[in-house]
Every structure is written in C-alpha cells, then in structure tokens.
C-alpha cells in the first residue's frame, strides 16, 4: 500500500503539469482552436543501416507543423503502412492541443497495444504534437515539461576493440575527449565469448561459424575490465552490454565477478523473458544493473522499478510511445531510486535523440544517455539536430523540439531495408541453436 500511495502522490503532485499548462495558456491566449489538417510520411535511408520513417503534422494554423519519428529499422515498411493506411486517417481532424488524449486514444486504436509497431507510430504523433505545442507557445519543449534541471545531457561513449589492449586504448581516447562514461565491447556483442569458425567440438554437419560459449564469456569479460582498470585507472566510469546472451546462472556469476572493477552499470544481462531472476542478482551482488532496451510494455519495466531490482531503465523513448510515456516512467523511477539511461544509439535518428534530450533536461531521475553521432549530410537533412561536445549532448533552445526535415535532401535517399540487417541478432551456439539477443 505504501508503494502505491507514493506512486499516486507523485502523479497528483507533479508540478510540471500545472506549469506547462499555464505557460501554454499564456502564450496562446486568444488564438483559435488547433486541428490536425494533414500528415505527410517521409521515409528515407540516408546511410546503410538507417531505415527511417518520419511524419510531418500540419495544422490549420498556417505555417505551423511538427515532426515525429516512427523509427523501427527491422520492420520499417510495416510501420510506413501502419501510418498511411491506419493511423493517419484516424488522426486527421483531431485537436492538436490534446496530447494526452491523443496518446490514450491512439494507444487503444488498434485494440491490441504495447507492440513495437503501435508504440513507434504512437511516439511519432506524440512527438509531433509536443513540437507543435512548443512552437505555438514560442518555447522549447523542455520548458513545457517543467524546465531545465541540468545544463546539458551527459552521454556515454562506445569504446571497444579486438583485444584487451585495443579496448583500453579506446577507453583512454574517449576519456581524453571529455567522456567520463565509456561502454566497452570487445569485438561486438558477445565478444570475448566466441569460439572461432570451425574450432571446437561441433556436430558432424550443420553450423560451422563463430559460436558463442557462455563459460568463455563469463571468464573473459571480467579479465578485460580488470585490464582496463589497470591501464586507464578508476576515474573513468565503465559500462558493458551483455545483450541478453546469458542464462540466469551465467548472468549471476558475471555480475559477481565484475564487482571488483566497480562498473557504472552492466546492461541487459538477461533476456526479457527471464527478468524475474533480477531478484537473485540483486540479493547476491552489488554490480549495478541496467535493463530495458527490448521493453515495450509497462508490465516489463514496472515491477523492476517498483521493486528496486535494477538501477537504470534502458528503454528507447520512441519504442515506448514517446515523450508522454517517458515522463511517466521517469516519475516512477524518481519514487524508487532508479535512474534513466535511454537507449538512443545505433540506427536511431536525430528526432528520437532530441525527444530523449528534452525529457532528460527536465527529470531528477536522469542517469545517463547513449551517445549517437550522425554523418554530416544527416545534419544537413535535419537542421537543428542536437550536437555532441566533450561528452555532452546540446539541443536547440528554439521553440518546439528544435529540429526539422529537409524533404528534398531526404528524397535523395529512398527508404531501403535489407532483410540481412538483423543477422547480428541471430548468434548461435556450438550446436547451431540460436542464442537470444
């Protein structure tokens, strides 16, 4: 009952809601009602591995539009169809000011909810409406979310290499460039735990490629981080992504062995299907845990946060439904001493990076955000994209999200999706069976 009362109190007493309402009311006093007039889908692949689907939401106020991202690299064509055939007809004519109502109605529009496709299209309209509201009020979105509680957003960098020495050198380089937090992978996800193609005891026929071995991984990774500590020191904050490759017993053993190197966090040490084992990990080790890159449903993150079984929540803001949902998760985290570490790297895009930024700027429960840089032509295509300097993310102080899409540049890069782009997720063991990512 106490936990429930604490959580309800946090929602009732959220002062940013009242502040946002007052700011917007003052800025738009006397203006006519705002309706969604049209929505355009912009699908583009400005680099190999980018399969981006954006929307521009136009209103009945001339010149006023907002942008949103429905980024889901592995099912981008399905997302595009969901927008064009199902959701856009539903959104046209709706009140653009009623963001929470739009979130709730979109959430139940498809009846079955909390799936990745429904969540990213929901995030797209949610982000676009926050963008519109900020532009109309003449304020950056973070002001409507309660105002700044920090000056910029700290990031962690992606370090790594093919061996211990290369990893240590990479960490030192990032640290010298201003990043206090560095995530380290040795040769990619599962690196340090692979047996070379053709080596080891295998079935007579079948899989003969690089094979993951849990015991080798659990032995190698603590040795890697001890080497980094010996070479680089203790000032840098170290992170590592297991990417869900381990069994529960392997996860517990790895967490215990990493205690001596004092990790900032270990990410996704278990697959989502096995999150109940975090109770045992929490009881037996002090290694900080981050979890949630694959989460899309409140039933996944809520018990881990409310029972204080993790230290960082790792959801991607676009994959959980956008700014509106992220603020609610951050409020829940604040009550239970958990911090955010939004997953915003890899194939993610500048709009998703910025919606996470605007949330991060306003929440006391912030922990860290993932670094993601883009080719220069992407910054030209998306003016106003956030920039990284010396380990910090700096967004725009212009009204709204602060970003737009140059459609002429986007059109030069037609949407492309290669079915092989997910091959990295299908790691296999020595017997040829799939190891879950």
Image: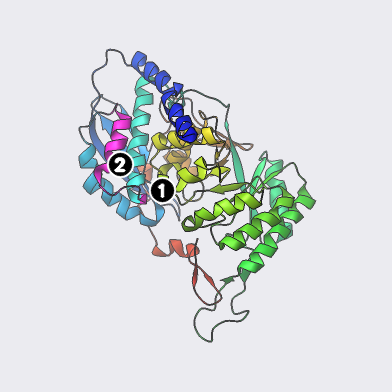
- Residue 434 vs residue 207, the one in the foreground: 434
* Mark 1 element type: loop
Q: Does 7 sit left or right of 188 as displayed?
A: left
- Measured from the top left, where is residue 387 in percent x and y? 54, 36
Q: Which residue is mark 2?
A: 107
Q: In the image, which disc is placed on residue 296? A: 1
Quadrant housing residue 12: top left
Residue at horizontal 48%, vertical 66%? 426
- Residue 350 vs residue 150, the one in the foreground: 150
Residue at horizontal 46%, vertical 35%? 1
Mark 1 crowd level (few <14, some 14–19, many ≥20, 10 Å Cα)? many
Q: CA distance from mark 2 to mark 1?
A: 12 Å
Residue at horizontal 30%, vertical 41%? 107
Instruction: Based on the picture, tell me whether residue 328 belongs to the magenta stretch.
Output: no
State how many labels appear: 2
Instruction: Based on the picture, tell me whether residue 105 belongs to the magenta stretch.
Output: yes
Quadrant housing residue 416: bottom left
Q: Earlier in the sequence, mark 2 or mark 1?
A: 2
95, above or below 50, in the image: above
- Residue 30 vs residue 118, the one in the foreground: 118
- Residue 381 vs residue 211, the one in the foreground: 211
Tell me the magenta residue range.
96-116
């Amino acid at each position: 009952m106490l936990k429930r009362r604490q959580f309800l109190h946090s929602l009732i007493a959220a002062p940013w809601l009242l502040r946002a309402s007052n700011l917007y009311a003052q800025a738009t006093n006397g203006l006519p009602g705002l309706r969604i007039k049209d929505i355009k889908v912009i699908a583009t692949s400005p680099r190999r591995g980018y399969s981006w689907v954006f929307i521009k939401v136009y209103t009945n106020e001339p010149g006023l539009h907002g942008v949103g991202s429905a980024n889901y690299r592995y099912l981008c064509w399905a997302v595009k169809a969901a927008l064009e055939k199902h959701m856009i007809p539903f959104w046209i004519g709706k009140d653009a000011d009623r963001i929470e109502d739009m979130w709730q109605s979109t959430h139940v529009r498809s009846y079955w909810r909390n799936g990745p496709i429904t969540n990213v299209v929901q995030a797209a309209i949610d982000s676009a409406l926050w963008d519109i509201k900020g532009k109309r009020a003449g304020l950056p979105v973070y002001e409507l979310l309660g105002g700044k509680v920090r000056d910029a957003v700290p990031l962690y960098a992606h370090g790594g290499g093919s061996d211990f020495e290369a990893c240590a050198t990479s960490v030192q380089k990032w640290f010298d460039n201003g990043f206090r937090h560095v995530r380290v992978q040795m040769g990619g996800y599962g690196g340090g735990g692979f047996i070379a193609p053709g080596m080891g005891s295998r079935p007579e026929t079948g899989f003969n490629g690089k094979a993951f071995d849990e015991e080798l991984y659990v032995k190698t990774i603590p040795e890697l981080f001890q080497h980094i500590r010996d070479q680089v020191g203790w000032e840098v904050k170290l992170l590592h992504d297991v990417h869900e490759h381990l069994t529960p017993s392997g996860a517990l053993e790895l967490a215990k062995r990493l205690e001596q190197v004092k990790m900032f966090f270990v990410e996704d040490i278990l697959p989502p299907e096995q999150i109940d084992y975090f109770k045992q990990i929490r009881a037996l080790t002090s290694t900080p845990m981050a979890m949630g890159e694959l989460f899309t449903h409140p039933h996944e993150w809520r018990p881990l946060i409310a029972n204080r079984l993790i230290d960082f929540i790792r959801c991607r803001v676009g994959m959980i439904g956008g700014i509106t949902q992220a603020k609610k998760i951050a409020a829940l985290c604040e009550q239970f001493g958990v911090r955010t570490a939004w997953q915003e790297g890899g194939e993610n895009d500048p709009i998703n990076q910025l919606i996470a930024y605007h949330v991060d700027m306003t929440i006391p429960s912030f922990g860290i955000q993932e670094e993601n840089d883009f080719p220069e032509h992407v910054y030209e295509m998306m003016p106003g994209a956030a920039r990284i300097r010396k380990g910090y993310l700096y967004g725009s102080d212009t009204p709204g999200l602060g970003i737009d899409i140059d459609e002429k540049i986007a059109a030069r890069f037609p949407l492309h999706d290669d079915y092989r782009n997910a091959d990295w997720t299908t790691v296999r063991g020595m017997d040829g069976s799939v190891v879950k990512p």
